[in-house]
Amino acid sequence: MTSYYLDTDSPNELFFSRYIMDANKHLSASEAMCMGSEVIRISSCFDIDSRILLGLIKLEFEYNQDAVSFSGASGLTQFTTIGIQEVNDQLGIRGAGQCTK
């Protein structure tokens, strides 16, 4: 994997999508672009560095959108159902389905 995607002071969706596609060869360009865009959007909502959120997602399940842990946590950041509902409520997007396959 090439690290230069994250060496910029102002990462964007294109940088992130390339980084994501390098980590998970099963994703399409549009899926990776959507993930990159959502990482930037959500990190700005919580006022955190988008590169940190991107790294967390990589650590959890290598950008596998369909990942489910043995405890039932699912998705890119391995939230439980209750956890994701709380986050979606805070973001005002419960049930909005922002990023689709």
Image (cartoon, rainbow, N blue to C red):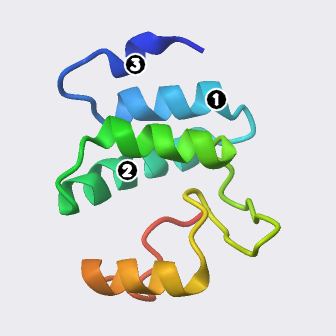
Kind of residue at badge 1: Ala
Alpha carbons under labels 3 and 2: distance apart: 14 Å
Kind of residue at badge 2: Val
Label 3: few (<14), some or many (≥20) within 10 Å?
Answer: some
Kind of residue at badge 3: Tyr
Quadrant of the frame with the C terminus: bottom right
Q: Nearer the viewer, residue 20 or 85?
A: 85
Q: Nearer the viewer, residue 27 or 93?
A: 93
Q: What residue did someone put label 1 on?
A: 23
Whichever of callouts 1 and 3 sits on the residue coming sooner in the sequence is 3
Give SS at disc 1: helix
Q: Residue at x 32, y 87 (%)?
A: 89
- As drawn, the label of residue 5 is 3
Label 2: few (<14), some or many (≥20) within 10 Å?
Answer: many
Q: Residue at x 74, y 59 (%)?
A: 67
Give SS at disc 2: helix
- As drawn, the label of residue 39 is 2
